Amino acid sequence: MEGRILKISSIFLTMTIIAASVILGHFTNIHIREIKRQQMSYLQMFASYTQQGKEVEEIGFDQQLRLEMPRGVPLKEVKIENDYIKQLITIQIPDAGGDYFDEHPLLGRSNHIADLHMDNGIIEMTMDSVYEVKCTLKKGYLYIDFLKPQEVYDKVIVIDAGHGGRSPGAIKQDIMEKDINLAIVKKLKDLLDKNNRNIGVYYTRTEDVNPTFDQRAQLGGKTEANLFISVHSNSTVDGQMSKYNGTEVMYDELKIEEGFSSKRLAQICLEETTAAFGSKDNGLTYGNSIYVIRNNEVPAALIEVGFMTNWEELNKLTSDKYQKKVAKGIYKAILRALDEGF
C-alpha cells in the first residue's frame, strides 16, 4: 500500500515539475523577448528576424517587405495612412494584436526606413523621403513596396497654403489670412481631384495646422516635384487699410532665370491668376528672402492673391465665388506650366 502511495506521489511530483517547467519556460521566453526589445531597436529586431529567416528558409520575394497576415483578413481591411510632411507611413493590420509581430515577424529590406515601431497590430515607419505605398496580398502574405512619386505619376506638384495653426498671418476685421489661403487651396484641390491627368499632388496642409518652414520647403525636393506653388494673401507693410490692391507673384531672383525656372513659373502664375479673377497685375517680386522659396529644390512661386488691407479686396477674398475664381486661375497656371514642360 505504501509503495502504491509512493508511486502515485512520484508520478504527481513528476507531472508537477513538467508543468512548472513549461510555465517557467513560457514566462522566461516572454522575459527574454522583453529584454531583447529593450536592448534592440525595432529596426535592429527587423534586421535580426530577416537574417534568421534567411538562415531557415529561402526568402526570395522581390518586394520591399513581407508580413504573414492573420488568417482570413482581406487586403481591403488593411488601413494605410501616409503623412507626407512627416514621411510617416502607418499600416494597421486587423487581428494582429498582442505578440503577433514576434510570432509572425516582418521581413525584408530596410532601405529607406529611417525608424520603425511595431506594436498591437500597427506598423509605423518613418521614411528617409516621400514614398507611395503599394500593398499586395498573395498566399496569406502581405507584400509592401515603396515607390517614388515620379514612379507613380507623370507629373508631381506641391501646393502650399500659407500659414496655419498658431501662425494666422495677417488679421483684418477678425479675418485671418491662414483661413483665406486654406479655403482657396481646398477649392484648388477640388479642381485637381477631378482632373483626369496622371498628376500627383502633395499638399503641405489641408487643415488648420502649421508645418515648419523646413517641412514645407523640403516637400518639393522629397517628392522630386516639377513645381511648387505657395498661396498667400497680402497686406501693406504697416498693416493699415489703404487703396493699394492687386496680385503679385514672388520668385527666387538669385537662381537661374532661363528655362523652367522659378521666374518663368511665377510669370505663368501671374498671367493666369490676374486673367481669371480680374485682379490688378502688380508684376513679379523678388522672393529670395522668403524661406520656402529660397530653400526649395524645385521651381517655386509664391502668389500674393490680393490685399487684405484693401476693403474691396478683403471682401472679395472672403467670398466663396471669388475664391473659386482664384483657384481656377491657379489651376490653369499649373496646367499651362506642365504643358510647357515643367
Image (cartoon, rainbow, N blue to C red):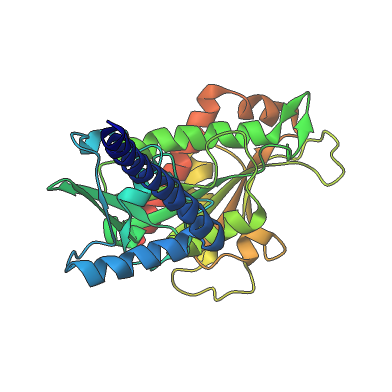
Looking at this view, is 341 or 72 the one in front?
72
Q: Residue at x 66, y 52 (%)?
A: 212
- Quarter occupied by the N terminus: top left
Relative image position of residue 136 (x, y in whole percent): 20, 48
The vertical placement of 31 against 323, above or below, is: below
Q: Residue at x 49, y 42 (%)?
A: 275
The vertical placement of 334 against 43, above or below, is: above
- The single residue placed furthest to the front in the displayed view is 1
Looking at this view, is 240 or 50 the one in front?
50
The vertical placement of 199 against 317, above or below, is: below
Q: Can residue 251 be seen in this view?
A: no
Looking at this view, is 236 or 192 the one in front?
192
Q: Can residue 1 be seen in this view?
A: yes
Residue 262 vs residue 93: left or right? right
Residue 159 vs residue 146: left or right? right
- Quarter occupied by the C terminus: bottom left
- The single residue placed furthest to the left in the displayed view is 139
The mark tally for this picture is 0
Q: Residue at x 28, y 35 (%)?
A: 8
Q: Residue at x 18, y 34 (%)?
A: 72
Relative image position of residue 81 (x, y in whole percent): 41, 41
Relative image position of residue 185 (x, y in whole percent): 51, 38
Relative image position of residue 254 (x, y in whole percent): 64, 74
Looking at this view, is 263 or 93 the one in front?
93
